Amino acid sequence: MLTAAIFFPILAAIVFALVPRPKLASVASDAPETPAASSDDSAGAVGNAPDPAYRKYERRMQLAATAVAAVPLLLMVVAWLRFDSTGGFEQVESVSWIPTLGIGYRVGLDGLSLSLAAMTALIFVVAIAYPVDLRGRAAPYFSLMLFLMGVSLGLFLALDLFLFFVFWDVSLVGMYFLIGAWGHGDAQRSALKFFVYTFSGSLALLLAILGIYLATDPRTFDMAEIIRQQPLPATGLYATLVFLGFFIGFAVKTPIVPFHTWLPPAHVDAPGPASAILAGVLLKMGTYGFVRILMSMMPETFERFALPLGILAVISILYGSLVALAQSNVKRLIAYTSVNHMGYVILGLAVAGAAAAGKADSQAIALTGATVEMVAHGLITGALFLIAGSLLARTHTYEMDEYGGLAGRARALTGLTVIAAFASLGLPALAGFVAEFQIFAGALAIYPWLAVIGLVGIVITAALMLRMLQKLLLGPLPVRWMSFPDLGRAEIAALAALAAFVVIIGVVPAWLLNVIDSFAGPLVGRG
Amino acid sequence: METSLASMSLDVIPEIILAAGGIVILLYALFAPRRAQPGAAILALVTVAAAAAVSAAMLRGTEQLTFTGTYARDGAAVWSKLIVLAGTAVVIGLSVPWFRGDPRHGEYYTLLLFSALGAILLAGATDLKEFLMAMMLSSATGFILVAYHRRSSPAAEAAIKYYLLGALTSAGALIGVAYLFGLAGSTTLTGLSAGLPSSGTNLALIAGAALVVLALTYKTAAVPAHAWMPDVAQGAPAPVAAFVTSIPKVGGFLFLARFVLALPDGGIEWRPLIAILAAATMTLGNLAALWQDDVRRLLGWSAVSQTGYGLMAIVALERSDLAVPSLLFFLLAYVLGNAAAFGVVSELRGRSELAAYSGLARTRPWLAGALSIALLSFLGVPPLAGFFAKLVLFAAAIEAGYTWLTVLAAVNTIVSIAYYARVLAPAYFGDLASPVPVLGRWAAAATLASAAAVIVIGIGSEPFLRAFADVSLLPG
C-alpha cells in the first residue's frame, strides 16, 4: 500500500509527461515565449493565456492532477488508521533489488515517517490544486509536481539507505526544473544555486552513507538492520568523518546557518506552490535525516556533537529571525522565518540527542516537539508561501511597502493570512505553539542557556509577523488596489485545508502526539 | 593442456568474426554500386551481433589464459567485448544517416570494426607484444576514422593531434616493453610478475612501467596524454567522436588493470601514482570543461574527467572486492551514456555551439530527454547507470584506503554540475534559437536506445553487478 502511495503519482507523472499538447493550444502554448511574458514578473495566475479553450484544458489537467494526488493522501489516511503505535517499523513492504550490494526496496513507517508522509501528501494535494501561472506548459508542470510527490513520500517511507538516497537526489532534480522553468525573476540562477548547494550536500551524504555501509557486517543498506548493528564506534576519526558527511548533507538541506544561503533566492524566485513544497516538504528531508540516520544509527557520536549542534540551532533561530525582520520583500521574509523555525527543530533534536542521564522525559518532550514543529512548519509555511504566490499573481510585486489596507478589500485573504501568521509566531491554540512549547520545555531541562537565548527568537518572530500583517492588511488601501480581487474558490479551499489542520493540531493535538510519541519515547530511551 | 591452433581459436571466435566481417565489408564496398553502399552498415551490424552472440555464450565458459599465456579468455575480457560491441552497434546506427551523402563510405565500417577489434584485443591482452599490436590496430584505425571527412580542417587538425600523441606514446611504449622484456626475460604478464625484480629501486623497471602506463593514459585519455580528446570530440565526425571517445578506453582500462597487477609488489609503488593521475585527470577535465562554449568540446573534456573517475577502480585493485566490478560497471555506464550524448549531437547534424541547444526541449523533447539522461548519468544522479558506477567506484576507493581521492571525486562532481547545467538549462528554459534539423530515424533510434539502456541498466543493475562480482582478471 505504501508502495502504491509512492509509485501511483510517479506513474501518473509519466503519463502526464507523455500527454501531447492540445492542437488548439499551439498559439497559447507558444505565447509565454514572447518577450512580454518572459519578463520578470509575469506570474499572473489568472488571465494570462488568452485562449479560453486552452484555459479549459489547463483546468482539466489541474483537476486530473489533483485527483491523482488525492490517492496517496487517502492511502496515508488508511495507513494512519492502521497504525498501531507499538514502536518499530510497521506496514513494511520489501523486495530484493540489488542483493549483491545489500540493497533492497524496503518501505515502511514509524511515527516519524507516518506524520511527515501524511503532511507531505496533504501539502502536495493543496499545492497541486493551487492556481498558478503555468506558462503554457500545463502537462510538464503537473508531471513534475506528481513526480516530486511520489519521490518525497518515498523518501520519508524508505527503510533502505540506498533507496533513501535515490529519492533524495531525484527530488533535487525535480525541484531544479520546477524552479527553473516556472520561476520568476532570476529563476535559472536561483535554480542552479539551489541545485549546486543541495547536490554538494547530497554528495557529502553519499560518502557518509558509503562510510556507514562499508562498516556494516554483513554489508547492508537496510536501515533497520543498521540501527540494530550500530556499526560505528562512538569515537574515532572514521566515525567523526561519517558524522560530518551526514551532518553537511542534512544541514544544507534543512538548512542550518551557515549552510542556508541557497534558500532565500530559491524560495523567492520559485512559483508559489513550489515554494510551499520546498519549505513544507523538502526542508523536512534534512531534519528527518537527522533523526532517522544520525540519532538512530550513530547516537553515541551524536551525543558528542549535541552541544555544538544546539549552538548552531540557536544561531539559526536568532539569525533567521533578525534577517527576516529586516526584509521588505514578503516572500524573502517568509523564507528567513523558515531558517528560524528549522532552528527550533534542530534545537529540539540536539536536546533529545544530548548525553543527559535521567532526563529522558525532557528529551522525549523535545523530540516530540521537534517532530510536531516539522509538521506544523510544513502546514504553516506552506500556507504562507501559497498566499505570497496569490499576492504576486494579483499585483506582480512582493514589496510589502506597495501593499496596505487589504483587510477591508479581501476578507478571505485576510482571515487566512492572519491564521497562518499567528500560527507561525507561536500563538497558543495553533499548531506552532504546541511544537515550540515542547521544544523549549525540553530544552530548559537540558540546555537552559540555549533555551533562554532561543526564546529571544520567538519574540523577534512575533514582531516581524505582526509587522508583516500590518503592512499588508492594515493602513490605507493604495488606490491602484481598489479592485484587488479576493482569493478565488480554489485558493480558499486549499488554504482552508491547511489552516484547518493548523487549528486542529493546536486545539486537540493528541491524535498526532500519540503517533509521534510512539517513536520519540523509545528513541531517547535507548541512550 | 591442449595447445593445437584449432582448439585455441575456439577462444577467439568473436575476434575472428569481427576480422572476417571487416574484410567482407571491404570487398562489398569495393564491388557494390553507390546506392547499395549503406548495405555495408547492415553487414557491420550483423557482424557485431554475431560476435556479441558468441561472446555472450562464452560467459559460461571456463576462465583461462590462451595462446600460451598471451591472451585472456576471462569474464572481464568477455564483458569488455560485450561493452565494446554494444557501443559499436550504437555508433553504426548513428553512422548510417550521417554518411548517407558520402557515395563511397562502405569501407568506413571496415575501419570501425577493426578499431573495435583493436579495443577488444587490448582488453584481453596478457602479453606486452600483444598489447603493442592491439594498440596499433586500435589507434591506426582511429586516426583514419577521425580524419574521415578529408576536406574538414577541424577533423584534420584533430587527427594530426591524435596521431602525433599516439605515435609518441606508442614509440615510448615500445621502448618500455623492451626494458621490461630485458628485466624479466618474458613479455607475458605472468612472466613479468615472476621475473621482474621485486625489491629495491630499479630505474629500468620504473622507466619501462612508466612508458607503458603513459601509452595507456593516451588510450584512456588520462593526464598527461589526454590532450587529443577535446579536439577529437570536436573535430571528428560526430558518430566517430562517439566511438573514439569511449570504445578504446575499454581496452585501455582493462590492460592497465592487468598490467599494474603484474608489477611486483615491492618493486614499484603504482597505487599512489595512479591515484595522482586519477586526481589530476578528473580535476583538469572538469575545470577545462567549465569554459567550453562548444558542446562537443565540452563532452570531450567531460570524457577526460570520466576517465579520472574510472581510474579510481584501478587504484582499488586487490584492495577492494568492488574494484573489478566497479571498473566494468563504470565502463558499461560510460560507453552507453557517451553514445547517447554524442548520439544527440549526431542526430542534430553535429550542431555544437551551445546556443544552438537553446529551447531544444520544446521542439525535440525526446532528444532533450536523451541528452539530459546522458548528462545526468555522467553527473551521477540515481537511478541512472552512471550513479551506480560512481557509487561502486567511491565505495571501492574508500575501501582501498583512498578516501581523499573519493572526496576529491565528489568535489569534482559538484564542479561538473556547472557545465552540465550550461547545456541542460538553455535546452529546457531557453527560447528556441532556430529551427532544428535532424538526421533521421536510425540515429534517433540508436540514441534513444542508448539513453533507455542507461536507465534500465541503472535500475536493473543487479544482474550486472552480480555477474561482475564473480569475474576474474587474469593473470592476477
Image (cartoon, rainbow, N blue to C red):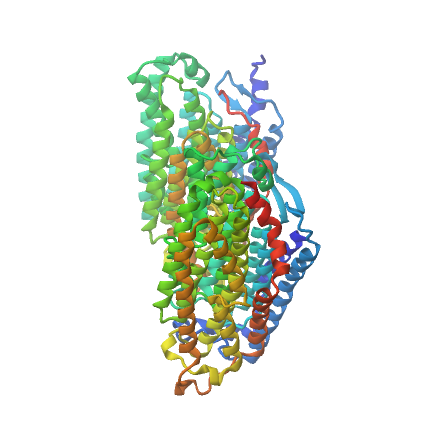
Please tell me whether residue B95 is drawn above or below residue A148 in the rendered image.
Answer: above
Judging depth in this view, the residue of B393 and B180 nearest the camera is: B393
Where residue B99 appears, x then y in whole percent? 46, 49
Judging depth in this view, the residue of A452 and A223 nearest the camera is: A452
Does any portion of residue B436 appear in the rendered image? no
Please tell me whether residue B48 is drawn above or below residue A274 in the rendered image.
Answer: above
Where residue A505 appears, x then y in whole percent? 59, 64
Judging depth in this view, the residue of B198 and A411 nearest the camera is: A411
Residue A103 left/right relative to A355: right
Quadrant of the image occupied by residue A121 = bottom right
Quadrant of the image occupied by residue B6 = top right
* The N terminus of chain B sits in image quarter: top right
The structure residue drawn at horizontal position 57% and vertical position 56%, both measured from the top left corner, is A116
Where residue B117 appears, x then y in whole percent? 48, 32
Residue A503 left/right relative to A275: right
Does any portion of residue A155 appear in the rendered image? yes
Judging depth in this view, the residue of A67 and B385 nearest the camera is: A67
